[in-house]
Structures are given as structure tokens and as C-alpha cells.
Amino acid sequence: MPSREHFEVVIVGGGIAGASLAYFLSERGMTDVLLLERESQPGYHSTGRSAAVLVEWDAIPALQELKALGGAFLRHPPAGFSEQPLLHPNGVLIAFQGPAWPAVRDLVPRLGQRGTTAQVLSQSEVCHRLPVLAPSYFDGAVLLSEDGHIDVHELLWSYLRRAAQRGVQRRCGVEVTGLRVDGTRCRGVITTSGDLEARWVVNAAGAWAGTVAQFGGAAPIPITPHRRTIITFAAPDDLEVSHWPLFTNESHHLYFAPESGGLFASPMDEQPMAPCDVQPDDLTVAEVIDRLGRLAPRLVPKTIRRKWSGLRSFSPDRVLVVGEDPQVKGFFWLAGQGGCGIETSPAVGAIAADLLLTGRTERYDAAVLSPTRFA
């Protein structure tokens, strides 16, 4: 059967953003959709390299609200959506030091108003839970006891499976090299496998979102990729770490958590760079070891099991960009997910589907996400 060349919606990017939109469009009855992925499999770049954690706290209120909306879906997905649980609520512990701590502590009641279970812990209470910590590097912490590890593989493939069951098509190994623009209207994409026509082209290209936008003269919104590095290593023999929450020290830029019989850790690096198949560098890996040596000395590894990096892409105000481009009609942004694309995908995918199909949504203040805010 020959490949079709015309679709109502072509989604550029097969990561969590594109997959979630495909699912929510199909749920709304829009199944004339094609998902394009340049790599040989979906989720190869940022989605597959995430720390994969739901953290319903964020210094940016717009993101905190999206995380809370996403968390509700992850805890209670629709019947039959996934084959395995999406969320393993082993908890998240976020520590602060200095002036940031009283400010954060005062915000905790607002988290509860949005449905997030949050508890303030003193320095001694934190050390009781994680005795490896050096208390001189934090004043207190917020415990999000119902947050924790997301099964990213299960979430991604549940989106893709359910969308495919309703008729959404997927093509991997196809790179978008240009946009077909007629005047001020996007009419489709140019790919390594030929041209495709579409009434809507969705820019869900992650770190490459800025590049895709430039193909068609869309609004010049800078979407900047930043490298984030993670290492894995064995836990000390005398410590049982499997029950530990993810621990983050926001003031000293380190997080660690249990992972596959050991631990993973990150220096929370944010190195701006061009979109690429990013790899860790030795200096950043050394920073992880150095910070563990100060903040949790007992955890300093003798050897590193594995190391990797992913790209987290940010807009200028660090809030997602979702909506129709103000300059090129039919070109729809779904970009700038930063470090919260996976946990917010259930909310953002639904919001994006609403906006694409009807131009409005009751789920969220769409103006906060709109690309027109940069016009």
C-alpha cells in the first residue's frame, strides 16, 4: 500500500511531547495524524535520557501548576491506558539553604491548595531520613511524599500505542528538512522521504525546535538546548538505599536517587549548546563527584557504572511555548519543555490538542504558554 502524502496534522518529533499530543488528538477524534521521528525509534534524545521524576514543586508558578495537572494523570490514568503503573511514589525531598529556605517554606501551603501533598521538614528531620547528608549545606527541606519515579518507557509507549490503535500513523527514520509555506500559511513539510501536505504542522522537535521554526520563517523564538549530565554508581555496601526518596539540594546544585540497585546523581548542569546527540564531558562528571564529597561524603563512588547527558530546551522565560505561530498560520509550537516535559506531558498534550482543534482550552490559561508573548 503506497504511503499517504496528505494529513490533517503532521507532528515533527517523536519524543514525549509529540507522542502525548498524538494521543490526546486521537482521544478527541482527530486521527488523521502523522508522527515523524528522525531517529530510528521514538524518544531517543531528551525523553530517553531524563531523570524521569515527578516533582510537583517549581519556582515558576506556571510550571508548578502544569506539574500538578500532570501528576494527577500519572497517578490515575484512564482505564486501559497503560499496562504498568506510570508512577512509583517513593518521594522527593528538596533542600534549601539561606534566604531561599524561608521563602520556599512560606509557599508550601499553596502547593496543598493545588492538590500536591507537601510537608516541611527541619534539618534534623531530613538527616534522620537521609543520614548520609552533611547538615551544614541545607537549612530544611520540602517533602513531596506522593511524587517519585516515572516509568518513561511505559508512558511514552502508552501514548503511542493508544494513538496507533485509533489510526494515528508513525514514521521513524524520516528527517524534516524544510517547511512548505504559501504566503503566511504553512502547508506541509519537506522530508528526506519526500514532501507531505498538512493543514497543521506541529513543532515538537525538542532541541531542534528552533531549527524547524526557521525553516518556515516562524516567529524567532529562541529555544536554547542545555546539557544535563547524570552518572550511576554503586551504593556503599553498608547502606540500603532502595527506599530513599530522590534528594535535591537546590542551593548547591546536586540531586541523587536510587536506581537499579545503586544510585544516580547529577550536578544539575545547564550548559547551553547547539542541538546534537549530546555526550557528557569529564569536567562535569568531576563536578558530580566533588559535590557528593561535600554534601554526602559517604556516597562518593569508587567507580562510575554509567554516564550520559541529555538536552533540556528552554524558552527565554523558561515556560513552555504552546500554540499557533503569530506569523505563520498552521504552524503550531509544542516546544521549550525544559526539564519538565515528561511530568507535564499529560497536561500539555491535552492543552495542545484543545488549542489545535478549537483555538481555546478550559484546562489552563493558554496565554501563559502562547508564542505570541514573545512577538
Image: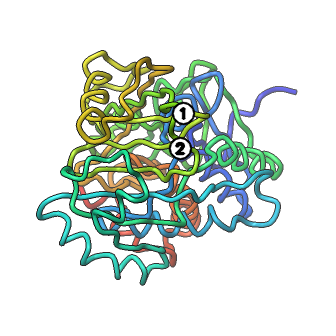
Judged from the image, the secondary structure of the residue bearing numbered disc 1 is strand
Disc 1 to disc 2, C-alpha distance: 7 Å
Q: Which residue is mark 1?
A: 262
The residue depicted at 18 percent of the width and 58 percent of the height is 97
Q: Nearer the viewer, residue 158 or 325?
A: 158
Question: Cβ–Cβ below 8 Å for labels 1 and 2?
Answer: yes
Q: Is residue 323 visible?
A: no
Query: Which residue shows up at 52% across the image and 69% down it?
Result: 69
Q: Position of residue 327 (x, y in %)?
A: 33, 51
Residue 157 picture location, percent across and down: 71, 43
Q: Is residue 281 above or below residue 209?
A: above
Residue 194 located left or right of residue 274? right
Toward the left, the furthest residue is: 99
Residue at the extreme right of the image, as rendered: 1
Q: Secondary structure at mark 2?
A: loop
Q: Looking at numbered disc 1 in the image, what kind of residue is underneath it?
A: Gly
Q: Identify the residue at image location x=59%, y=37%.
A: 14
Q: Residue 218 location in percent, x, y? A: 34, 43
* Residue under label 2: 241
Q: Is residue 117 visible?
A: yes
Q: Reply above or below: 374 against 202.
A: below
In the figure, is residue 95 to the left or right of 195? left
| Quarter assignment of residue 313 | top left
* Of residues 179 and 137, the one drawn nearer to the viewer in this rendering: 137
Image quadrant where one finds the C terminus: bottom left
Image quadrant assignment for residue 350: bottom right
Judging depth in this view, the residue of 103 and 326 nearest the camera is: 103
> Where is 220 relative to 326, above or below?
above
For label 2, the crowd category at 10 Å Cα-Cα, with few meaning under 14, some 14 to 19 and many 20 or more, is some
The disc label shown at residue 1, or none: none
**Amino acid found under the numbered disc labelled 2:** Val
